[in-house]
Every structure is written in structure tokens, then in C-alpha cells.
Image: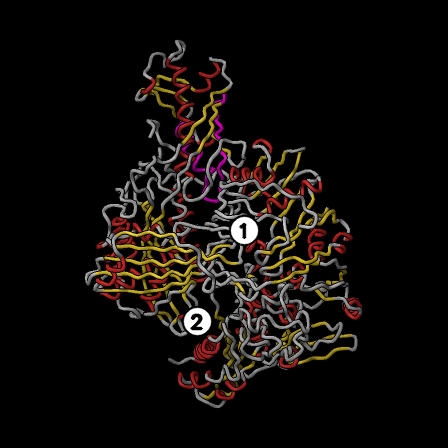
Amino acid sequence: MYPFSFTKAANTREALNAGRSGGRYIAGGTTLVDLMRETVERPETLVDISDLPLREVSVTERGGLRVGALVSMADAAAHPKVRALYPVISQALELSASAQLRNMATIGGNIMQRTRCTYFRDVSADCNKREPGSGCAALKGFNRTHAILGSSDDCVATHPSDAAVAFAALEASVHLLGPDGERSVTFADLLLKPGDTPNREHALRQGELITAVEIPSLPRPLKSGYLKVRDRQSYEFALTSAAVALHVRGGVIREAKVAAGGVGTVPWKLSAVEQALTGERPSDHLWAEAARHAADGARPLQHNRFKVELLTRTVERQLRTVGGTK
Amino acid sequence: MSPQPQAAVGAPLSRVDGPLKVTGKALYAAEFDVDGAVHAVIVDASIGRGRITSINTRDAERHPGVLRVISHRNAPKLPYRDNSGSNNPPGRRLRVFQDDRVLFHGQPVAVVVATTLEAAQHGASLVEVGYDAEQPSTDLHKGKPGKPTTYARGDADAGLSDADVRLDLTYQLARNHHNPMEPHATIARWDGNKVTVWDKTQWVVGTHDEIAAVFDLPADGVRVINPFVGGGFGSGLRCWPHTIVAAMAARETKRPVKLVLSRRQMYFGTGFRPSYEYRLRLGSDRRGRLSAAVHDIDAETSSYETFTEGVMVPGQMLYSMPHVSQAYRQVPLDVNSPIWMRGPGFASASFVIESAMDELAHKIGIDPIELRRRNEPSEDEGKNLPFSTRRLRECYTVGAREFGWNRRNPRPRSKRDGNWLVGMGMAAGVYDPGRFPAEARARLDADGTAVVESATSDMGPGTYTSQTQVAADALGLTMRTVTFRLGDSLYPQTGPHGGSATMASVGTAVVDACNQVRKQAIKLAVEDRESPLYGADAGDVVVRGGRLHVQGTPSRGETYRSLLARHNRSHLEARGSYTGPPTPERESYAAYNATFAEVAVDATLGLVRVRRMLGVYDAGRIISPKLADSQAIGGIVGGIGTALLEHTVTDHRDGRIVNANLADYLVPVNADVPQVRAIYLDGEDNSGNALGVKGLGEVVQVGVAAAIGNAVFNATGRRVRELPITAEALL
């Protein structure tokens, strides 16, 4: 671990000032401290933001839900509003990490967590994300857990978060507060595909702070759920996952929100699957037909070819689980 | 057995050291508070093979708190006396910082010593090492095998070509790492020319001998202490390079040095269960009577040592057949040396043999248990010796009944539960336990309490508890009045704590020592006119609860305390020993099991979930039933790991282990462990030890992976001949 200084921000302004001069924000620290120990992360200054007033979950005027950035994963998952309105978020959170980590880690940090690519986490390996221009050891290395979607020749690392997959499916946006004031960006614009700059992972500006995640109001009734496929039954990142939310009225799917995890360099919105579902009547045939589009554009690697088929089956299973029939 | 009543042995007691462990008072190697200790962190090679061309230590040495950076450039030349003991495999053991060669990725190339752990860690990251890298060879399938170890009886090739039914199957077994909870750690302190080492080890004696050999010290120049081990599974069976690094660093800095391996360093700083490619050809008649087997076994070893394990034994003695040939070849690779891991060799061989037996049963259409019964040998055909005890048939009978084997449909894919395909499988297991010379010392004090000491270890099976049970009964004392001590090289010597050998070996020595002490006391009493026992036949006197009395006449007797007080004796003491099994062996002595598994496989997603497991064990006498259950559950959990999750992955481009952490190297978590049950056949095996035991800790993992794999076949109709069995094989 490289030496660093540590300050605790008493209020938002203090945090922003520290952030503007290069301080790195830390809340639960469940990823950052690990990476500092491995010397992957070498921040000079850490700014502890855990005292900031960002721990509220509230229903927005338009009927959506706003989850403060410092709400712990455990609290967000257990919140009655989250459970009632968006089971897919609760489930994604509860299938993440371990109970201990969920108690520490925050919603803002969960979105910002860095990839589990083992070459990224091993400072003696080549990694364009960690050291631009050094190469991607995973591309031709052991890449069973790596991305099949959104990857480039420079980076094939997955985004590890489950909750972010649910947020992406629901087209959530992220509220930011920076030196230049407030703004919000959609999930689609927040996390960046690697392209030839895999070191650039998100659209946050220097010193910007995530204050909340807002899930938009969606037509009711909305059925939703999250399926996580992994080798062991707990405490592991996804091989594949699917977040599905469906609004069915009059026997017809009016809205479909679907995203996949464990397969993309960012949480992967499955627009083609959504389109195939919208306006159709639920049926086993429809689930299979729609899921066929899940891996559109996949670029499998030597050890993760199976993810193409597994993703398709994961999405189909979860469409049936949420949408019924059979 | 002694005439003594057995009160403690066989009772389901909790661990005597349990309160110490749960209150944090049990001190593990890194936890000893050694005055003035400083910290050492190893710098690992970041190439898989080659030479070190430069080492820049300037920044590290300038970092506040850093005391010294040691590498081959400035390390003292160490004698490295030959030591064929200490579980060192044949070869030339890795010599730390003695030259510029890099033999494997992660090899120690320098060590940074600092006043704080943080300074040492950061200092280590500041050391810049330049290399002349060569292409390492780490792929078992591409390496050049060494000379095979062979075995043959009959004419296996002819037997195979004459067979009505033939199978030719090749299995791939992944490398597994032990991953004990406690990392390997050493504290070394020199006092003049003598060194004291607190070291995580399963064998203080072996570590003592290795340190003495490396530094060329007399036997009394080294003391190794390790009262508690936070799991081992075999990883502590030899003295690893970091222990030498710590001792060297302590001598160079003239300070006590503490060195704890990181979890990542555990993957190349200690050993592992080697990966295998195992081709098995089987021949039988149409009724399943085996005639021939040809075993071609390739296993990884390091370039500098030739590691072997008992992988050939099951193929020689598990089933009866006239023709067997085996070739076991070590493939030297640019990796660190393997070491035995729970059920060593036997667990690997049993996955192959027991999977193949299941295939044969399916092919000829008979029940897998019936196939095994038809091939049950009447003697050990490998050793040409009678079995001391072998009760596999009973294991099958009890297991089938208790598991509900009759509910298994032999037709694969015939049972469904929602998305899940459900199947059952079973396998036989065998383990040939070690037995080695051992010594113990027992001392009965005037206050009626006793202390028993032996330089053995307790990596988790409960040696403290079970040896206390054995000692308490032999002395006629209660559990609470006996203290068993272990983990100090000054105590009477034993072999390694591994190979299921401890109870048979150390336990026999403990019984011997305690019997002698008890007999000394009885002799004092029966020859003492003032004793109520005066004149009694010594053979008729027993001791219970610290009181000697004539068997059948409890009123005629006295306590140890009154006896010793009257004789003005502060204590009675004796040294006991076990000399090992008779040589040459007269009987084949092994522990057996039948293991049953029920699994569910997601029909579309390919996920395997174990639902139920049962092990039925022919392990001789069970000294401590509660601890035995812990062993059985632990072995089955380990087997689930091997079957479905555990796989150390090497990047063959540079020899790097890519999943050297517990997030990427998967071991079972609670959610993966189903209902597990263990049954022990009642009985004992008195062929080689005073206690009638056969050892349990290893056999419990043997056969587990095969039982699970066979259940996966029964569930899905898919044979997966590669471990671990993961979703991609079942999609």
C-alpha cells in the first residue's frame, strides 16, 4: 500500500473542495482499500464522505424512487419501497457479495466498483485499464469470466456490479454534484465502454460526487426480478445475470426492461430483447424468441465461449420467471 | 487394549481447546508477542523462468522504517546441508537468495525488513527487479515426462485385448490448493547461535531438522514452536522457503523477524495438489468381472524436485483382477513443488477409477454397487497380503439402505424437479494410512493431575482432545485433570501430522507412556504395607477418576494423591513409544468408505447443486465421535470443492497463477454444502496399533468427487471427465 493522507469531510462543500484538488472519495471502502493493498490504486488523498447526508430513500414527485449514494447495499435491499416497487433491485443487491460487505458497501460505491479482471488486479501483469498502452493480458490469457459484449482489443474486463445491471435495465439516472453544480446522467451515459481508452471508465468529472440514484417512474403493475448464474451459490460474481421488468396490461407486454450482467464491459442493456417483447403476448415461445437476441454482437474469447449460450438461456429463464406461463 | 475402563474414549466430547479458540486466546504462529520483532515482506519473481539481471533497492531502502533489503546480491551463503528427511522430495530444494535463477513465477527474489508491516509492504513494492526472462513450461500436457514408476501383474495388454468389454477413458484433474484459513507465517529469533522459530507447520520436528540442515546448526541449536494450526490439509507438511527467509532475515538484521505470507503468496509459497492427466483402460467380462486395467498417470512436479504420492495404490488393490499395469510419470514444470493434500494421491486416483467403474456399470447394465461387489478382492492383490480388516461390503449395504439407493433410477435423466434434473451416485474410497515411530512423555503430579507431551500437531482434527481422551483412560483420570501438550520440537519426537497417522502412531506412544505411569503407581501401592492395596495382584488393580482400586472391589483402594503424598513423590513419569508397523508388513491395513451423493443439475443452465451426501466409513475404532463428524463433514466439503469448484489456473504464457485469491479460487461456501451425514462401522482394527484405529482424516475426502460426478451422470446422462465439473460442460 502506498502512503496516503486521509481526511473526513464534515459537509458536502468540504468534500467537493477536497475532491477538486485531487482527493479520492471513499465510503464503504470495500473495493478501494483492497485495490490499494494490491497497489493497483495509489491515491494520495482519501476523502471520507460517510458523514454526508446521502442516506435517504424517497419516492420522487413523479413516482420514481431516489436512493441516496451512501445508503448501504443491505439497507437499500431491505427498504420497503425498494422491495415493493422494484424487487429486481433488492434481489440484485442481495445476490451480491456477502452480508458483511453489503453492510459496508454503499450504492454509489457499488456502481463505481472496479472490474474483477485478475490481470487488472495483479500489478505485474499487462493491463491497459491500469497502465494505458501496456496491453491486455486477458485478451489471450485466462478469460473465462470476461466480457463477450462491449469489449475491444484493448480491454475485455466486465463491470462486476449486480445492482448496476438492475439500474441499467430500469433506465435509472445518477445525480451528480460537482464544483460546477448539479447534473444528472443516465446509466447508459455514465459507464463507458473501453474502446481504446479502457482507463476511462465513467463520465464523472474531476471532483464530482454521486449523490443519488434515481429510478424513473414506471407504469404499474410492474413485475421484476433478477437471476444470477454462478459456479457457487453465494459470494461470487456472476457468470451471467439477467434483470427483467415487465408491465403487462390487457394480456400484452406494454413495457419491457431487460439488462444483462457478467457479460458486458458495462451493465448491458438488451434493447433488442426489449423490442422483441414489447407489444407481444407472453408465451414460452416469445421468451425463447426474444432471448435469442440477448447475445447479439457477442465477441467471445477462448475460455468464455459458453457465455453466449448461457446468456441466452439465462435471459429466457428470467423472462419466464417474471412473465410467467409454462 | 489395557484393562482400564474406557470412559473418555468413544465419548462425543467437545474440543478441549475450544474455549481458547473461540475467545482468541489460542496463539497461532504469527500471534506470539516476541519482544522487538520487526516485519519482513517477500518480493516475488514476476517472471516464470529466467535470470535476475538487476535489483534496484534504493527507493525501498530510503523508505522510512526499512531496515534491510536482502536478495541474492547480498544474502549470506547458506550451507543447505543435505536433508532427505523433513518431507523434502528427491531433488535439489529451492535455495533462497543463493543465485540469480528464477525457477517459477512468484519465487522469492528479495525480502524487505522494516520496523512496521506497512513499511515492509511498501518497501517490497518499491524494489525494482530486472529479468532476463525465458519461456516457462507450465502446461502438464506439453511438458516432457520423467522416467515412469511402474507396476505390473499378469499381462495387462493381453488381458485387455481378450476382454469382452473395454473402456478407454482419459481424465483431467485440476490443480487444487489447500487454502487453510490461517496463512503460513514465521517468527524467527536468534539468541547467539541458537534460533527459535514460531512457524505454522504440521510437523515441528521436520521444520526443526530442515532449519538445522539449511543453517548447519546442531540439533539443540534450533527450537520450533507451534501449538495451534489454523487449518492445514497438508500445506504444513514441509518447511517452505519463507521460513528460511525469515530465519535468514532475523540473523542478518539481528532482530526477531515476523513474516506472514499474503493469501496470494500462499499459491506459490507453499505446495498444492498436482494436476493430473490419467488415462485408464479397463477390461471386463459381460457380467462385469474385471480382468485387466492399464493406468497411464501423468502428474505435475517442479523442475527442481520430484514429488510423488500414493496415486498408484488404489489401482492395485481396490478391485480384484489378474492383470494390471501402471506407469506413473512426473512431468517437471517451471512451477513450485507440490505437496500432499487431503487424501493425497488416493483422492485423485479414486476419481478416475470410481468414475470408470460407474461407466462400466452403466455400459453393461448392472447396479454400480453390484459391480463393485462382484470385484471385491479376498486379499490385497497389490501387496499379496491378507487384509487386516476390510469391510467395504458392509459400507455398501449400510450406505445403500441409509441413503435410499433403491430409489435411484439407473436410467439417466429420469428424475426431474422443476428446472432441476436429479440424480444419485456413489463411489468407494480407500486410504492407506501412515504409521511412523513416535514418542510421548507422561507425568503424573502429586496433586493427581497429569501432563502428556509429544511433538505432534493439531491442524484441526482435534489432536489435543483425542490424545487427552486416550491419556485420561490409560491413566484412569478424568479429562479435566489431564493436559496434553504438542507443537514444540523439545517434546518427544514424532513423524508428521498427516497421512491419517497421528492417532495410530502418537496415540499408541501416549497409551504406552500412560500405561507405564499407571503401572508404576500400582506397583508402589501393592508393595506398600500402608496402602489398602498392599498385596493385591497388580494386574487386578484399575484406576478410575484418579483412584486406584481392585477390579470388582471399589472400596479397596486409594487415590494417586494419597499414594504419592505418602511416598513423598512429586511425580511419576514415563516415556512411551510406538515403533511403527511390523516390517515386513504382514497385513494390508487401510481405511475404506462408500460415499453417496444426490445432486440436482439445472437442465438449461448447467449448474450443479449437491443436495445430500452420506459417507459410510470403515475406519476402525472411533476415538472421538464428535470430532470424527467434523472430519467427515470437512472431507466431504473438500470433495465438493474438488468436484465442482476448485481449480488453480496458470497462465502458461508466463507461468503466473491468475486466480491466486479466495474470490477467484472458489471453495465451497455454506450455501454449497448440503445435508451431510457420516456413519462409522462399529469395530476396531488391532493389526498395527494399540488403539484399534485406522485413521479417518484422509479417507473422508477419497471418493467424494467421483460420487458427485456419477450423480451428475445419473441426473443428466453427461459424463464429465474433467475436474472441476462446471456449467460449460453441461450446457
Q: Residue at x 58, y 60 (%)?
A: B48
The quarter in which the N terminus of chain B is drawn is top left
- Between A147 and A124, the residue placed more toward the observer is A124
Q: Nearer the viewer, mark 2 or mark 1?
A: 1
Give residue A29's mark: none
Q: Position of residue B531 (x, y in %)?
A: 40, 12
Secondary element type, mark 2: helix
Q: Decide whether residue B449 is among the magenta residues.
A: yes
Q: Position of residue A172 (x, y in %)?
A: 61, 79
Q: Provide the residue designation for mark 2.
A: B728
Q: Quadrant of residue A37?
A: bottom right
Looking at the rendering, the stretch of residues picked out in magenta corresponds to B445-474
Name, please, the residue furthest toward the top. B529
Q: Chain of mark 1?
A: B
Q: Give above or below for A2 relative to A220.
A: above
Image side of residue B393 versus residue B303, left or right: left
Give residue B270's mark: 1
Q: Give above or below for B543 relative to B604.
A: above
Crowd band around label 2 with a 10 angstrom C-alpha radius: few (<14), some (14–19), many (20+): some
Q: Say whether disc 2 or disc 1 marks the residue closer to the N-terminus.
A: 1
- Please indicate, yes or no, whether residue A127 appears anywhere in the rendered image: yes
Image side of residue B712 versus residue B482, left or right: left
Q: Give above or below for B406 relative to B318.
A: below
Q: Name the amino acid type tagged 2.
A: Glu
**Are the residues under marks 2 and 1 on the same chain?**
yes
- Between B417 and B396, the residue placed more toward the observer is B396
Secondary element type, mark 1: loop
The quarter in which the C terminus of chain B is drawn is bottom left
Q: Decide whether residue A7 is among the magenta residues.
A: no
- Between A180 and B76, the residue placed more toward the observer is B76
